[in-house]
Image (tube, rainbow, N blue to C red):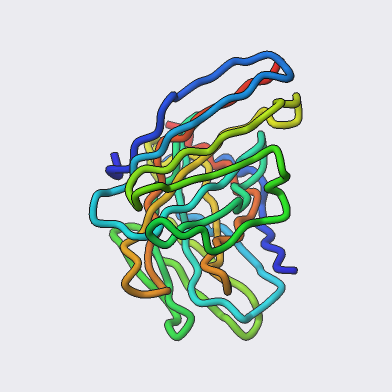
Amino acid sequence: KQEVTQIPAALSVPEGENLVLNCSFTDSAIYNLQWFRQDPGKGLTSLLLIQSSQREQTSGRLNASLDKSSGRSTLYIAASQPGDSATYLCAVLEYGNKLVFGAGTILRVKS
Amino acid sequence: DTGVSQNPRHKITKRGQNVTFRCDPISEHNRLYWYRQTLGQGPEFLTYFQNEAQLEKSRLLSDRFSAERPKGSFSTLEIQRTEQGDSAMYLCASSLGGRLQETQYFGPGTRLLVL
């Protein structure tokens, strides 16, 4: 059974810092990996999707990497801003077209 | 706003009552998914539809839960004889259905509280 773990569970940083969120998964038989953002009480917004054949994806200040063989992904956020405060969820797409999520990292960026 | 809508946004009910939630996916999307998220956890997969066919169901979906997508457009999720453990956020997502490796777009969710 696929298990996705995210470290750290919570993170508080001053504005302007660069930061890294970590995600690991136990079964490398995945189709893709996605990073989502969730604001309190809201749905999920897709940030980046990395196909299983890819190593990284970039969007603005966000960069996500994937090492499928070791079961790891990182989300790098450059020059963090208070508006980046949210919960960040990592999810892998496996057979059966289902996403398996980690529990998330709660990020707080202090101004 | 991703274009996926869910109603109601909040529902409070008493234990033992039945509840029904509705999801309207992005109009051209063939695939529709239901997930459940409890406090402090990531969403867990419940079921998914390709057009009107229900293709996958999680073991989390007990016999008190039923999902339908009668015309391949909107979907409903019904919970019969609700229990306090059913309290959660119920999320719907949709995807185009052309390729397996594609983004799922999530709705805002329906938050259920069972008293």
**Residue A78 seen in this snapshot:** no
Residue occupying image coordinates x 58% and y 62%: B56
- Residue B7 lies, in percent from the top left, at 41, 28
Asked which quadrant contains residue A92, the reply is bottom right
Residue sitting at the far left: B28
Answer with the quarter of the image where residue B29 lies. Answer: bottom left
Q: Quadrant of the C terminus of chain B?
A: top right
Residue B96 falls left or right of residue A107: left
Q: Position of residue A102 (x, y in %)?
A: 63, 55
Q: Residue at x 49, y 45 (%)?
A: B68
Residue B44, relative to residue A91: is it above or below? above
Position in image of residue B72 (x %, y %): 35, 53
Q: Nearer the viewer, residue A79 or B44?
A: B44
Q: Relative to A30, say whether B81 is above or below.
A: above
Q: Is residue A1 left or right of residue A22?
A: right
Determine whether A101 is above or below B24 in the image.
below
Q: Single out the residue that lies furthest toward the front.
A: B70
User: Quarter holding the N terminus of chain B?
Assistant: top left
Instruction: Count how many numbered circles sit on residues in the image.
Output: 0
* Residue A2 visible (yes or no): yes
Residue B38 in picture, x, y percent from top left: 66, 37
B90 sits to left or right of A84: right
The one of B61 and B42 positioned closer to us in this rendering: B61
Q: Is residue A45 above or below residue B28?
A: above
Q: Residue at x 48, y 73 (%)?
A: A32
Q: Residue at x 28, y 59 (%)?
A: A60
